[in-house]
Structures are given as C-alpha cells and as structure tokens.
Image: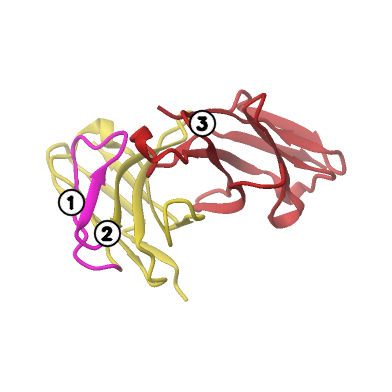
Amino acid sequence: NAGVTQTPKFQVLKTGQSMTLQCAQDMNHEYMSWYRQDPGMGLRLIHYSVGAGITDQGEVPNGYNVSRSTTEDFPLRLLSAAPSQTSVYFCASSYGFNQPQHFGDGTRLSIL
Amino acid sequence: AQSVAQPEDQVNVAEGNPLTVKCTYSVSGNPYLFWYVQYPNRGLQFLLKYITGDNLVKGSYGFEAEFNKSQTSFHLKKPSALVSDSALYFCAVRDILISSGSARQLTFGSGTQLTVLP
C-alpha cells in the first residue's frame, strides 16, 4: 500500500517556467489537498478537493491551478513560476475533511 | 475565521521528563482538533484528534492531549519523553460550523520544534 505518492521529490525552475506537481493516492480517499510549508509559517492550504470534479481554493491559491479528474490523482500546476513560490509542497488525502489526513513526503521546489 | 497559535517555536526537555507542547485555537463554532508530527524530510504523520466526548485524548506513541474549552487550548503531553520524540509538532483546527465558510479547511499552527536531550 503506497499511500500518498508525490513526484518529483526535488525540482529547480527558472522564473516564468511552468510545471505540474503530481499527487496520487491509492486509498480511495475523497478529500485531497495541497499545502505549502515555509519556515515559521506552518502549512498553508493552497487548493483542495472533496471529490472527483470538485475543487476549491484554500488560503493561498494565487499562481496555482488544480483539477481532479479521478479519485486517485490531484495534480498542482504552477502557471508561471515566481521566486515567492520556492517552498516545500505537500499533498494530503483523507476519507473526509474531519478525518486524519495522510501526507506525501513532499516536493522541494526552488525557483531561481 | 479559524486560527491556531503555537506560542513556543522551540521546546527542550530532558529524556524521561514529561513534555508539553502548547496549542490554542479560535473558531466560530466548536472545533475539530488535531496533532501531527513531522520528522526531517518527511510528510506529517497523524498523532491524535479531538472531535467530541472525553476531554483527554490518547494517541500514538504514548502521546495524549487535553481539550480545554474555557481556555480554548489543546496541549499535547507525554509523561516520559524519549530522544526519538524529537521532531516538529503541528496543531491544527477545523470549525464544525459549516456556515463558517472555512469548515472544509484545516488550519495549521506554525509548529513547535521539540528537542529531547539525552
């Protein structure tokens, strides 16, 4: 049982480039979310989904897009990378939004 | 709006001594409360949660937390700390009140680095 799998683990981008962070879970969880973790700021919610075809914005959605075409996958797209998006990104999933979340091991992203 | 405060960035404790990591929260309705732990270069791992019922919640690895509604606190505790407990700990809250607007979102505190000294 793989749990929540994030790829890539590390990525360096140049300002203005776009990319997609992948997230997949094999637990048939309906609720999935993306967070960014910055020093001293904890985790901040970027976008979340309560099921296939349904997404909503979190606390810091600007500069990011998501889609949820299947229960298993929830990719995060950076449209035009900026240095302020340098961070560690975590994907999480759970049966519902009041259930414990299962986290991936993160993607460490640097924007030059 | 909902919020969480972890007033201590760093907590140091000697191995074998009791530990406490503090958390206070603010919600419009009643809270769902969680504690997570993060080891270096890993994602967060669930420790325990409070939904309703007994104010003392027991979780993984010998940790427990006490819900105090009057003080709006949910402090994490362990009777006897281990060196292996050294990690970053996060408190998180969600408002039960659906009409609060943020009820589907989990809000995390800024984290407390726990160091257990041998």
| Residue assigned mark 3 | B110
What x and y, as percent, mark residue A105?
45, 56
Amino acid at pointer 1: Met
Report the predominant secondary structure element of the magenta stretch: loop
Image height of B48 relative to B90, above or below: below
Within 10 Å of the Cα at label 2, are there few (<14), some (14-19), or many (20+) other Cα atoms? many
Structural distance between the alpha carbons of marks 2 and 1: 14 Å
- Say whether mark 1 and mark 2 are on the same chain: yes
| Residue assigned mark 1 | A19
Amino acid at pointer 3: Ser
| Callout in the foreground (2, 1) | 2
Q: Is residue B55 magenta?
A: no
Q: Viewed as shown, does residue B29 lie left or right of A44?
A: right
Are the two marked residues, 3 and 2, in contact with CB atoms closer than 8 angstroms? no
Callout 1 secondary element: strand
Find the magenta span and give its range. A51-71
| Residue assigned mark 2 | A74
Colour of chain B as rendered = red
Are the two marked residues, 2 and 1, in contact with CB atoms closer than 8 angstroms? no
Chain designation of label 3: B
Within 10 Å of the Cα at label 3, are there few (<14), some (14-19), or many (20+) other Cα atoms? many
- Say whether mark 2 and mark 3 are on the same chain: no
Colour of chain A as rendered = yellow
Chain designation of label 1: A
Within 10 Å of the Cα at label 1, are there few (<14), some (14-19), or many (20+) other Cα atoms? some
